[in-house]
Amino acid sequence: MGRPYNAKTLYSECTTLCFVVLSLKKCSKCKAVRPRKQFSDNKNRPDGKYSYCKVCRDEHYQENKDKINEKLMDQYWKNRDKHLERFKTYRSDPENKKRIREQNRAYYFSHFFLTRARELDSSVTASDLARLWKKQRGRCGLTDVRLDRSIAHLDHIVPRARDGNDELQNLRWVTREVNQAKRDLLDSEFFELCRLVITKANKEKQIGKYLVNHIDDNKGSIANPQQSRGLPGVIRVSESSLIGLDAERNLLERNALGANKGQASRQPERLNEKTPVKVMR
């Protein structure tokens, strides 16, 4: 036979049922009924939540901050070696390493803007960085390449090494490669560096095309030396020297640099007996 119900017991159980259905909980300190989301998690409690709400817990911590911190520090130093050994054992397991790496990666991507904002020494928030991303339409500020969170970096328009600040007006989203190449350069200096690289690449490309298109199969040399007046020098190569084309380009570039500085060009050494290289002025 079941236990007899009275009005007080029935009211208590009905109230508890309503709290569970409506996801409510009563704070044991302020006696206020609040949503369960306003109570911190505690796996040691039967319902998985602290008996104090977050507001009351914060007030309690502020009132007893020194006492609580001192107690935590005593517990830490008392059990430090045991915790370190347990942590080391846990991290030594390959499965646990993989799990920790995946958890860190998931946290990083889910808190992408927040982690970036915390690295800045300014009042820029995660919402500001998200609006900046939306303003750039998710594209690199210098190359217009589509960005994703695995390659996106925050670039300072005026670098920190040049007394740049972390304000939002001095920030932009770029790719990892662009940020690593720009380093502490200003935009004008970086653009000039890119121009020099492109000029050098185009020059080598033109020299390579000239060598390939003007090889005389019969004589094993440049067919029409008169067309090479625009180049720094004329080289005479054999047919098999196309294998060592990169080395010949380097010799030609060194000769060109010496001519531009007003220095007398030297006779380059032979690569080998089968592929002689001769420079004619």
Image (cartoon, rainbow, N blue to C red):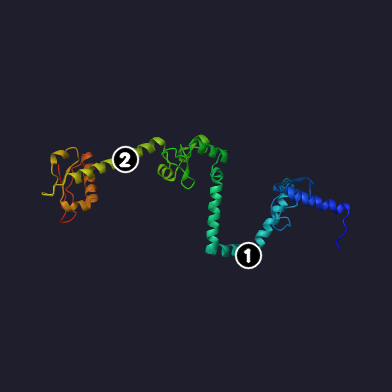
Q: Is residue 261 visible?
A: no
Earlier-in-chain disc, 2 versus 1? 1
Which amino acid type is shown beneath numbered disc 2? Ile
Q: Where's residue 172, x and y in %?
A: 48, 38
Residue 156 vs residue 64, the one in the foreground: 156
Q: Where's residue 44, x and y in %?
A: 71, 58
Which amino acid type is shown beneath numbered disc 1? Lys
Alpha carbons under labels 2 and 1: distance apart: 60 Å
* Mark 2 neighbour density, 10 Å: few (under 14) some (14–19) many (20 or more): few
Determine whether, in the image, residue 277 is placed left or right of residue 47: left
Count the labels in the image: 2
Is residue 241 positioned above or below 2 on the image?
A: above
Q: Which residue is painted at 13% across and 39% down in the image?
A: 226
Q: Which residue is painted at 35% across and 37% down in the image?
A: 192
Determine whether, in the image, residue 77 is placed left or right of residue 98: right
Q: Which mark is residue 102?
A: none
The residue labelled by disc 1 is: 82
Determine whether, in the image, residue 256 is placed left or right of residue 60: left
Residue 95 found in image quarter: bottom right
The residue labelled by disc 2 is: 198
Indicate the quadrant containing the N terminus: top left, top right, bottom left or bottom right: bottom right
